[in-house]
Image: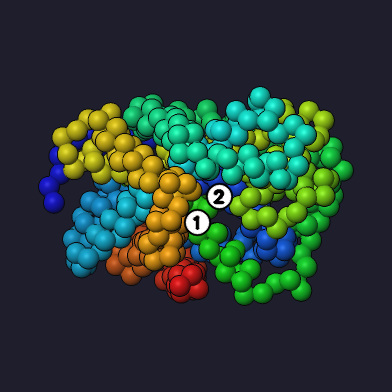
């Protein structure tokens, strides 16, 4: 492969980098997926297993991706190509970078569709479409959204246009500036929603549900769900963190930054639960609604509580902000590759990559209507993209990253780069060489 030499961007500050990385991690997985997984998996037992997994398995892989990106100073594909050559390892390691960039591209295509749903619900909340509705009414509203190709294309296109507009402005002017604006706004909205949850009468029940474990409900399925979500929530295996690491200087302590990102990501996920579950309990709604918890169950409450329209607007704006911070990070590895592989400018690379993801997203959204009967291996296009990425590309890419860092790079060089003494590095080595890979393999084979 040949590259076009261009000046590689850098984060302007450690804080900007941490906020951008946290923004990538804090997406629909925190505000949408985490609460419904807690609801489906029995509450506190899932939460505690998840917290253990995210620190023991997620954190080492996160550090590994940043370390590789900072060493390579290129997109994930070229980074793995160059580092494999320098370490005398097989050229096949380039597949780790390739699968990460491919995963980011594929996920963005259908993630933008869900981001479009969130935008549509902001509109519905503003004009009062949830007012007085029961479960059947909200269900019909959501079904009507999915059944209309034109409406889905509009919201999907608007969401992707916002994403392209931010990424096209570059690392400091786009990614970093957006993170510094959206993350505080997201945190502020979440605090307001948690405070509102305290007034509903269901807050103490939510606290018990999330933090008072009933170990009798613990089983292998809950452990696997917690392990899988801990891996997914940090944006691992998507080339994102490797790309973000490529914009890092040597002055950033990777372990300290990773601990900060993991803590912020976890706090926001828990806060999302404390914002959502009090409303669910206070209104006698069903916890086990799965993905429908956000788009069907909660709007019923918003339509039947005092100032519900305002709470609904705040919630879906929050959800949209979270979706945008993740979407821009999903587009970035693809743009970085196109920009370094071709003579195209940053703007042109972003437009090309964005339009390609948008086009694939059109096929994904048509799975809910016009292409509903078109199946591949028994899955529609939307579900196929989700399955291919979450069950195959993400775990295999994450596994490749941690194995390469732990077994192919010089141990002493890694120790010095992480700023660890011999004893702490022994613990790191145990996590990186054995525990994290085994955890990822368990998720992979369980998904199969």
Res 280 visible: yes
Classify 10 Å Cα crowding around label 2: few (below 14), some (14-19), many (20 and above): many
Query: To which residue does mark 2 refer?
Result: 29
Residue 237, horizontal then vertical, whole percent = 40, 57
Q: Is residue 14 depicted above or below 413 in this figure?
A: above
Q: Answer yes or no: do the residues labelled 1 and 2 have beta carbons within 8 Å?
A: yes
Classify 10 Å Cα crowding around label 1: few (below 14), some (14-19), many (20 and above): some
**What residue is rendered at 60% in x and 34% in y?**
121
Q: Of the numbered discs in the image, which one, if any, rests on residue 232?
A: 1
Task: Choose the circle earlier in sequence order: 1 or 2.
Answer: 2
- Residue sitting nearer the eye, 6 or 392: 392
For the C terminus, the image quarter is: bottom left
Disc 2 is placed on an element classified as helix
Residue 387, horizontal then vertical, whole percent = 44, 61
The CA span between labels 1 and 2 is 8 Å
**What residue is rendered at 15% in x and 44% in y?**
3
């Amino acid at each position: 492969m040949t590259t076009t030499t261009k000046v590689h961007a850098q984060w302007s500050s450690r804080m900007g980098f941490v906020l951008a990385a946290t923004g990538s991690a804090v997406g629909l997985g925190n505000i949408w997926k985490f609460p419904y997984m807690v609801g489906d998996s029995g509450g506190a037992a899932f939460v505690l297993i998840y917290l253990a997994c995210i620190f023991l398995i997620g954190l080492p892989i996160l550090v590994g991706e940043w370390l590789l990106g900072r060493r390579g100073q290129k997109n994930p594909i070229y980074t793995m190509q160059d580092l494999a050559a320098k370490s005398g390892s097989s050229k096949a390691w380039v597949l780790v970078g390739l699968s990460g960039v491919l995963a980011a591209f594929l996920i963005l295509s259908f993630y933008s569709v869900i981001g479009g749903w969130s935008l549509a619900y902001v509109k519905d909340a503003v004009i009062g479409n949830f007012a007085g509705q029961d479960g059947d009414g909200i269900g019909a509203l959501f079904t009507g959204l999915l059944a209309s190709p034109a409406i889905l294309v509009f919201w999907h296109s608007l969401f992707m246009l916002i994403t392209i507009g931010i990424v096209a402005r570059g690392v400091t002017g786009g990614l970093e500036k957006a993170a510094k604006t959206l993350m505080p706004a997201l945190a502020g909205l979440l605090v307001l929603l948690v405070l509102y949850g305290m007034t509903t009468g269901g807050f103490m029940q939510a606290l018990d549900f999330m933090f008072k474990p009933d170990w009798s409900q613990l089983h292998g399925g809950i452990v696997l769900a917690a392990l899988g979500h801990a891996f997914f929530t940090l944006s691992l295996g998507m080339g994102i963190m490797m790309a973000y690491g490529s914009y890092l200087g040597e002055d950033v302590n990777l372990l300290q930054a990773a601990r900060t990102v993991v803590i912020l990501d976890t706090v926001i996920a828990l806060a999302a639960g404390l914002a959502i579950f009090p409303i669910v309990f206070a209104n006698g709604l069903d916890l086990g609604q799965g993905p429908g918890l956000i788009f069907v169950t909660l709007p019923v409450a918003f339509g039947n509580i005092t100032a519900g329209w305002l709470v609904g607007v705040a919630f879906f704006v929050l959800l949209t902000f979270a979706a945008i911070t993740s979407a821009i990070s999903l587009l970035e590895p693809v743009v970085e590759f196109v920009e370094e592989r071709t003579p195209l400018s940053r703007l042109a690379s972003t437009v090309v990559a964005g339009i390609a993801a948008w086009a694939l997203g059109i096929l994904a959204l048509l799975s809910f209507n016009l292409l509903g009967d078109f199946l591949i291996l028994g899955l529609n296009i939307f579900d196929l993209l989700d399955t291919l990425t979450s069950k195959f590309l993400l775990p295999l890419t994450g596994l490749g990253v941690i194995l390469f860092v732990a077994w192919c790079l010089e141990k002493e060089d890694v120790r010095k780069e992480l700023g660890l003494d011999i004893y702490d590095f022994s613990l790191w080595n145990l996590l990186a060489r054995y525990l994290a890979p085994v955890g990822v393999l368990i998720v992979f084979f369980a998904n199969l």
